[in-house]
Amino acid sequence: MGGRMTTAAAVAAPPSEFRTGLTNAKLGVWLFLASEVMLFATLFTTYIVLRLGASEWPRGWEVLNVPLGFTNTLVLIVSSVTMVMAYAKCWDRDYKGFRIYLGVTIALGFVFLGIKSFEWAAKFRVHHFPSTSIYYALYFTMTGLHGLHVICGMIVNGALFVLSKKEWDHPLFMGRIEGSGLFWHFVDIVWIFLFPTFYLL
Amino acid sequence: MSDHAAVASIDPRAHHPHRPEVNIYVAVFVALAVLTVTTVLVSYWHLPILAGVAVAMMIATVKASLVATFFMHLKGERAFIYGILAMTVFFVLFLFILPISDQDLLSGRMTHTNVTAEAEAR
């Protein structure tokens, strides 16, 4: 933006990045999510093709702990609500409320990972590894990739939690929360499909 | 004036069309929780696999749509985002349909048993 631009002019002619009605950041996050959809869609296709071609396949409830998967589903859903509430508090300019909701979102990420690690460890203890069967290969690959996404979301949210001390009043801060939220909700959506695929079918 | 001051003069909320609606967030949360309980309860009936897949994926799709519509604010989003998503859905359909139909065509001809039987016959 031109340094000599007056405040009035800046408002009348918003910078070029707003021509689509979107900030660059938001556009970027959505394009990234589109590529993520392709990534996970490929894995789900792999699952379908391998399952259709398999002579036998375990039913989810025979090999996995449904109550734990159910709990983790609820944990992620609640964390999506707290994430969107953090955005709402950002809108309301309520710093304290924002910190509480974002903090709870990060904490719920830890709860999810804790339960997931417990499930994985239980499998390793009885010598069930990705090499055990196609089912376990897909289970570990897809829940593992999802887990990595949870970790990434927590890192971004954690960074924003720390940054909010200094950058709370930055005009782009709310956009960052919105972008991070979009990613977090996407991770929730992926789990919404992973849960029935591996635990209930 | 400095660049930063010019940017700061714009209310950040002006570029965020999504005014938070906390009542809707709570309603969506209740719907998601109920649907999650439903999908687990249905699984205890041990439906035949096709019926089970149909019910589970239908519920999952509704849940995902709720998250995308209200938490990701797709409701009232700019047309540009809809365009990106339409393109994504178009290509994802290919990602599903092509490999699965290919597998369907191949099955019966190239199964592991057939290949082994063929090798033994030789």
Image: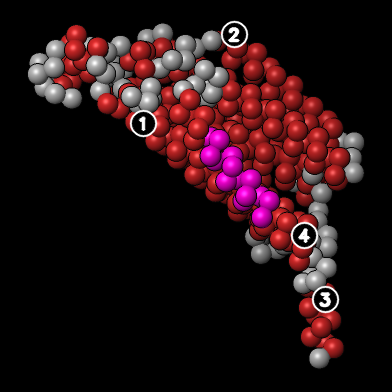
Comparing marks 4 and 2, which lies closer to the viewer? 4
Which amino acid type is shown beneath numbered disc 2? Asn
* Distance CA(mark 2)–CA(mark 3): 59 Å
Which residue is denoted by mark 3 in the rendering?
B114
> Which dot marks residue B104?
4
* Distance CA(mark 1)–CA(mark 4): 42 Å
For disc 4, the chain is B
Which residue is denoted by mark 1 in the rendering?
A25
Q: Is residue B120 visible?
A: yes
> Does label 4 or label 3 sit earlier along the sequence?
4
> Predominant secondary structure in magenta?
helix
Q: Is residue A129 left or right of residue A146?
A: right
Which residue shows up at 74% across the image and 37% down it? B57
Residue A136 sits in which quadrant?
bottom right
Which residue is denoted by mark 2 in the rendering?
B23
Q: Which residues are magenta?
A: B85-98
> Does label 2 or label 3 sit earlier along the sequence?
2
Q: Residue A15, relative to residue A38: is it above or below? A: above
For disc 3, the chain is B
Q: Are marks 4 and 2 on the same chain?
A: yes
Q: Is residue B93 left or right of residue B56?
A: left
Which amino acid type is shown beneath numbered disc 4? Asp
> Does label 4 or label 2 sit earlier along the sequence?
2
Which residue shows up at 33% across the image and 15% down it? B12
Helix, strand or loop at label 3? It is helix
Q: Quadrant of the C terminus of chain A?
A: top right
Which residue shows up at 80% across the image and 71% down it? B109
